[in-house]
Image: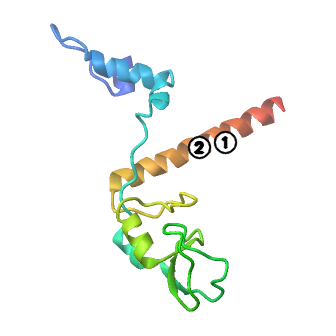
Amino acid sequence: MSDYFEEMGWTPLRDGETPNVLLQMARFLRDVGMWDMLGQDEKLPPPASKAAVEALEEIKITDAGSKQCPVCLKAFESSEIAKSLPCQHSFHKECIIPWLDKTNSCPLCRHELPTDDEDYEMYRKEKLRAVEREKDLETLHNSMFG
């Protein structure tokens, strides 16, 4: 049978060693939910990956009468080539490429494109897992008490 420290993957303090108070405070804030309220769990999105930007679909604007680029607010001209994101929002190439060089999301709906940042991709997957866990807990709760 393993002891508490082995089970948690920790090592006990050695003689004369003091605990890391800042680490303890950060864990406490995380455990009581304050870390989320402070916004410390959110990372700024990195630029979209070069492959994702190159793979964006180019579309030919056919009915330009009511459509405009959401970034520059200029109307699309008939038979103009525009870039379309996976969320189906269309932009001038000159407008969306600089945007995606700074962030990986659509300026309108915040649909995220893949990035080259492995840490951010892992963070994004963990955020999705947390949402799924919340949904599963809600479903479990409703099935037990509903």
At numbered mark 2, what does the secondary structure look like: helix, strand or loop?
helix
Residue position marked by numbered label 1 in the rendering: 135
Please report the residue visible at 34 percent of the width from the left and 18 percent of the height from the top.
24
Tell me if I can see residue 52 in this picture.
Answer: no
Instruction: Give the x, y percent position of residue 96.
Output: 44, 70
Q: Nearer the viewer, residue 118 or 54?
A: 54
Q: Nearer the viewer, residue 121 or 101?
A: 101
Task: Check the image and report above or below for 124 versus 88.
Answer: above
Q: Residue 19 at what x, y percent from top left?
A: 25, 14
Check contact, mark 1 vs mark 2: CB within 8 A. Answer: yes
Image height check: is 106 above or below 17?
Answer: below
Q: Secondary structure at mark 1?
A: helix
Task: Give residue 21's quadrant in the image.
Answer: top left
What residue is at 51 percent from the left and 25 percent from the top? 33
CA distance separating discs 1 and 2: 6 Å
Relative placement, left or right, of 7 versus 18 is right
Q: Residue drawn at (47%, 46%), measured in percent from left and top?
A: 126
- Residue 55: quarter of image: bottom left
**Residue linked to disc 2:** 131
* Rendered location of residue 85, percent (x, y): 53, 72
Between 56 and 141, the one lying in front of the other is 56
**Above/below status of 43 relative to 98:** above
Q: Quadrant of the C terminus?
A: top right
